[in-house]
Image: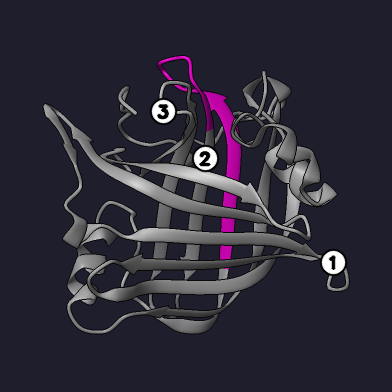
Amino acid sequence: MTSIFRRALGGDFDRLHPRLRERFGFAAGDGRGCVGTGVMRRIWPRAGIARPLLALGASRNILFPEQGTDIPFTIENHAYLDRYGRDTLTFVRTFEFPHRRRRFDATMVYNDERGCVVDYLGTHQHVAVDLRPEVGERGELRIRSGEQRVRGLRLDVRWPTALTGAADVRESFDDELGRFRIAVRVTNPLRGLVLAYSGTFDVTYVDTTTSALPASVKPLREEPRG
């Protein structure tokens, strides 16, 4: 099998920094996963109308309304085949705020029909987002979101523009620091910035042939439509 990011990037995948190629280069059949641990230097959601929406999303592990500095976090990336036989990569982010723990869950697949990575957000994959990864001049990975759709039961609609959150994710490896860097901004076309966070982390690779995939990283419901 070929990793979903190699499929999405094609020949550009080889331009990624070697540590990023390692991190995003495994698929379900490789028996590997990785767990990143680090600190978010700053997390800041927008005040006002965005806060209730973030709180609502937090009930399904999609974004959150808390803010803070120097927040410990983990990110769990595991590759597996979902119930529909699709090579799937988890992005489960856990943030340890002083008074509560928050999670931001996502599972990603490559969709041949749409020609891109599809990111299913939250515990029930009710939101499907097209992702367009690209490689920067210094080997960094940039991921920008596109069309967003509501998936669930008989729902099959595009997410209203007023409720969308366009994500811009930048991940790189700092050779001097010896750590990965990540910066995320989520914006709304009408309201501007909704949520942003940035930080650094280390990665440990795990052998998934000798230990079962943690049930906690898999969604409670899987959606067949991209």
Boundaries of the magenta span? 73-88
User: Which x, y percent locates residue 184?
Assistant: 51, 66
User: Which x, y percent locates residue 99?
Assistant: 39, 78
| Residue 188 lies in quadrant | bottom left
Structural distance between the alpha carbons of marks 1 and 2: 24 Å
Residue 34 vs residue 223: left or right?
Answer: right
Q: Is residue 183 above or below residue 214?
A: below
Q: Is residue 176 above or below residue 148?
A: below
Q: Is residue 77 magenta?
A: yes
Structural distance between the alpha carbons of marks 3 and 2: 20 Å
User: Which x, y percent locates residue 85?
Assistant: 47, 14
State the residue position of label 2.
Answer: 90
Which residue does the image show at 31% across and 80% down from the upper left?
46
**Which-is-in-front pick, marks 3 and 1?**
3
Asked whether the beta carbons under mark 1 and mark 2 sit within 8 Å of each other, the answer is no
**Which-is-in-front pick, marks 3 and 2?**
3
Asked whether the beta carbons under mark 3 and mark 1 sit within 8 Å of each other, the answer is no
Q: Quadrant of the C terminus?
A: top left
Secondary structure, mark 2, is strand
Going from N to C along the chain, the mark reached first, 3 or 2, is 2
| Residue type at numbered disc 3 | Arg
State the residue position of label 3.
Answer: 114
Which residue does the image show at 27% across and 66% down from the upper left?
189
Of 200 and 168, the residue lying toward us: 168
State the residue position of label 1.
Answer: 178
Judged by its main secondary structure, the magenta piece is strand
Structural distance between the alpha carbons of marks 3 and 1: 36 Å
Residue 193 can be seen in this image: yes
